[in-house]
Amino acid sequence: MPTKRLSIPPERLERWLAGFADRHGPAGHEATPDVVTVSAADGACARCTVPLAPLAVDEHAPYGGLIEHARRDRRVGVVLVRRGGYAAGIFEGRELVSSKVGSRHVQGRTAAGGRSQQRFARRRDKQAREAFDAAADVAARIVLPHVSSLDAVVCGGDRAAVNHVLADARLSELRDLVVAPFLPVPDPRLAVLREAPDTFRAVRIELSEPDT
C-alpha cells in the first residue's frame, strides 16, 4: 500500500480520525507513549506520532487519549540555531510570551587554497564558536529561568549547531527536557519562531491505504 505523510493540527485531529473511519470502516487502535496506530477494517493504517511525547495512555479514552493529549496547552521552550543566527522563546499554548532573536556574522566558504584558506577557515570557525556562544547565552537568559515550569523543550535549525549550543554546561537542565520533533526551520527570525507551534503541536501521521 502506498504511504502518505501528513501533519494534522490538534484542532483537526478528531475530525480527521472520524473521516478515516468513515472511509475505511470500523477502526481499532494500539497506543504506546510515542505512537498510536489506528487500523481499519479494509486494511488501512494511520500511524500517529504523539506530539510532545510521552502520551499517558488511557485505554478507556478514544485512541488512548491521543486527542486530548494533542489539544492540551503546554508551556514549551524553543531553541533555534543556525550558523550565524539564533532564537529562543517560551510558548504558552500557541502564544509566544518571551523571546529573543539575534545573529552573528559568520563568513561563507571560500575556494582559495593554501595558507590563505587555512587562515580563513580558522577565522570562520572562531566566528561560528562566538555565534554559538551567543546563542547559548540567549537560551540561558530566556529559557533556563523557566525550566521548572516547562513541559518540554523543542529545538530546530541545524542539528550540529543546536548540539553545540546545548553542550553548554549551563543548559544541562534543558537537555533533559528536549523532545521531538526537531524543527527544520530556515534562518531563525522572529516570524519563524512564532510559527514553531504549527510544527511541534501537530500530529504527524503515516497513512497507508489500500489501492482502489
Image (cartoon, helix red, strand yellow):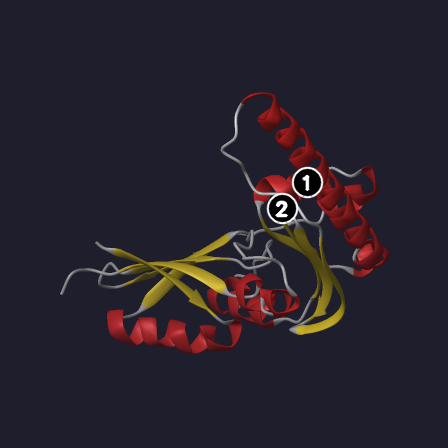
Q: Quadrant of residue 122?
A: top right
> Could you tell whether 191 is left or right of 67 in the image?
right
Q: Quadrant of residue 131?
A: top right
Q: Quadrant of residue 8?
A: bottom left
Q: Position of residue 4 (x, y in %)?
A: 31, 59
Left or right: 92 as drawn, with respect to 110: right
Label 2 with label 1: CB-CB less than 8 Å:
yes
Residue nearest the observer in this picture, 147 or 18:
147
What is the x, y in percent for residue 174? Answer: 75, 48
Q: CA distance from mark 2 to mark 1?
A: 6 Å
Q: Residue at x 52, y 61 (%)?
A: 59
Where's residue 31, x and y in %?
A: 48, 55
Name the disc covering residue 83, or none.
2
**Which amino acid type is marked by label 1?**
Ala
SS for dot 1: helix
Residue visible at 52% across and 72% down in the picture: 10
Disc 1 crowd, CA 10 A, few/some/many (<14, 14-19, 20+): many
Q: Is residue 158 left or right of residue 134?
A: left
Chain-order first, disc 2 or disc 1: 2
Q: Which residue is mark 1?
A: 128
**Side of 82 relative to 46 (left or right):** right
Pinpoint residue 202: horizontal percent, then vertical percent.
51, 65
Q: In the displayed image of the protein, which residue is found farthest to the top?
A: 114
* SS of the residue under disc 2: loop
Can you say which quadrant of the picture contains the C terminus? bottom left
Q: Which residue is located at x 54 percent, y 57 percent?
A: 186
Front-lying residue, 87 or 59: 87
| Mark number, residue 161 | none
Q: Residues within 10 Å of mark 2 (few under 14, many from 20)?
A: many
